[in-house]
Image (cartoon, grey):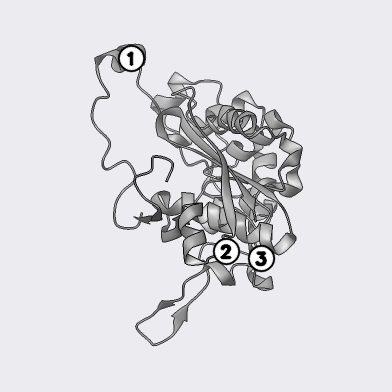
Amino acid sequence: MLAGAYDVAIACGVESMSRVPLGSARPASRGRRFDARYSAGLVNQGVAAELVAQRWKLDRDVLDAYSAESHRRAAAAISSGAFDPEIVPVPLTDGQMHTTDETVRASTTPDSLADLRPSFHTDEMAARFPDLGWVITPGNSSPLTDGASAVLIMSEERANRLGLRPRARFHAFAVVGDDALLMLTGPIPATRKVLANAGLGIDDIDIYEVNEAFAPVPLAWAHELGADPAKLNPWGGAISLGHALGSSGTRLLTTMLNHLEATGGRYGLQTMCEAGGMANATVIERL
């Protein structure tokens, strides 16, 4: 839309993590200059989450408590019907309709998560990072998920010609590159940049959708931005709802808009970390 190439577009994404392994399309080398700068190699995102937890002093109890709250919020949202307007029923072979995200576990507690073992500890990584606490587990990480999502985007001029009332408008965007080794911290500078672009402060935002790739990501983000925890992923996040990679962006956008409409909020901010230290952020305004 901004480039003027289209006046109506569908932004969409799909991911089948049960069939296509994470990282299967990753190149062996990112180039000579990159390989020279990171001669020891980058790490997988799980180890990066360990590094973030270490830097922000986020211990296992804090991570598991946050993760259990993600499940509680998601389960409450499902029970209230909050997700009904944004889920497309999927027909099953037995004639039934699948209408609920499968990864939400309403019975999750910090105590039940405490029994899980670290997921990313290896002798090689332990030797490279001897001070890591190894606190990232399946319980405080987003699960492998299949999913798809889509949103309809239209220019203001075309919407007016068609007599359509928009639900929201894009207010500001930002894309940044951050530490390639930590990798998951990009949402912090991306948020600062998008707020500056929008001329808004963090307290002007009514809901923050910060992708829960791992629990340290939103926790470090909230600490650095001074964000209100009650506004952070109020209907749960990827730890409970899943993170089907290619579809997560428009899923976050859809949930954020539905929450704004349900609560009468005005501004929503979404941000997501990406591999290699990239991150994006978007601010929308409900109309």
Helix, strand or loop status at disc 2: loop
* Res 269 label: none
* Residue 78 placement: quadrant: bottom right
**Which image quarter is the C terminus in?**
bottom right
x and y, in percent, of residue 182 in the image: 49, 26
Helix, strand or loop status at disc 3: helix
> What residue is at 65 percent from the left and 41 percent from the top?
63
Crowd class of label 3 (few under 14; some 14 to 19; many from 20; radius 10 Å): some
Give the camera-side residue of 100 and 120.
100
Q: Earlier in the sequence, mark 1 or mark 2?
A: 1
The answer for how far apart the CA atoms under marks 3 and 2 are is 27 Å
Judging by the rendered image, the residue that carries numbered circle 2 is 165
Name the amino acid type tagged 2.
Arg
Task: Using the image, determine if residue 101 lies above or below residue 257.
Answer: below
Q: Nearer the viewer, mark 3 or mark 1?
A: 3
Q: Residue furthest front?
A: 161
* Residue 15 placement: quadrant: bottom left
Crowd class of label 2 (few under 14; some 14 to 19; many from 20; radius 10 Å): few
> What residue is at 40 percent from the left and 56 percent from the top?
8
Give the side of residue 282 with respect to residue 208, left or right: left
Crowd class of label 1 (few under 14; some 14 to 19; many from 20; radius 10 Å): few
Name the amino acid type tagged 3.
Ala
x and y, in percent, of residue 54 in the image: 60, 26
Judging by the rendered image, the residue that carries numbered circle 3 is 77
Helix, strand or loop status at disc 1: loop
Judging by the rendered image, the residue that carries numbered circle 1 is 39
* Residue 13 placement: quadrant: bottom left
